[in-house]
Image (spheres, rainbow, N blue to C red):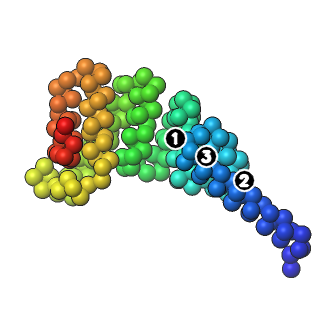
Amino acid sequence: VSNPSDVTIQQFKEEIMNELLNRTASSYRLREFGKTLRYLEVLRDYQPFVTDDQKAMFGQCYKAEQRYNEALSIYQSMLQENREDLRIFREIASIYTLAGQLPQAKQTLTQATQIAIQYYESKYGSAYPILVDPTRLSDIHYTVFFEKATVLYQLGEYENVLKDCSCAIFLRPDRAE
């Protein structure tokens, strides 16, 4: 049998944690990233684990606060857990781009596009350009090719820009403008 005051304290702690979770979500929605980071740091100290959503929030907040090394650290740890998540590659590349590290952004997006192509080949074989139905693919496939083309343009690699633009147009012909 537990002590009644222990139950009360435990309930109080849970109420505080729930309030903190609500404030975190609210400040994040309002794009108050500094405040969100403070809440997340408290949560990290008192929760037994940090969820993937919270990790992504940390990364977004660090990125918005121009704390690029911390953002990269978060996303690289997430990538260790899920080596084929194109969204994580995209986030890492966008941080490198914001930090002016275009060669690293290019390398990251190249990895992402290679993973996408490996996915197509594993599902459809080498005839994937004919067989793949681009409308059945997530937008992230289009995004990594388009953003890679953008980075390549900034690096002056125009022939490769055209190649990645062609892939992006194939994946989302309605966005070819």
Residue on which the image places disc 1? 60
Relative vertical location of residue 22 with respect to residue 91 in this rendering, above or below: below
Q: How far apart are the two marked residues, 3 and 1, measured between alpha carbons?
A: 13 Å
* Residue 72, position as x, y percentages in the image: 50, 35
Q: Residue lying furthest front in this view?
A: 30
Amino acid tagged 1: Gln
Relative vertical location of residue 81 with respect to residue 101 in this rendering, above or below: below
* Residue 137, position as x, y percentages in the image: 26, 55
Amino acid tagged 3: Ser
Q: Residue lying furthest bottom in this view?
A: 1
Residue on which the image places disc 2? 46
Residue 55, can we see it? no
Q: Decide which of 62, 30 is in the foreground and name it.
A: 30
Q: Which residue appears at 78% of the width and 61% of the height?
A: 13
Q: Which residue appears at 37% of the width and 49% of the height?
A: 84
For label 2, count other residues whose C-alpha is less than 10 Å away and answer few (under 14), some (14-19) or many (20+): few
Amino acid tagged 2: Tyr
Q: Which quadrant is the C terminus positioned in?
A: top left
Sequence-first disc among 3 and 1:
3
Residue on which the image places disc 3? 27
Left-right relation of 2 to 53: right
Q: Which quadrant is the N terminus positioned in?
A: bottom right
Residue 152, can we see it? yes
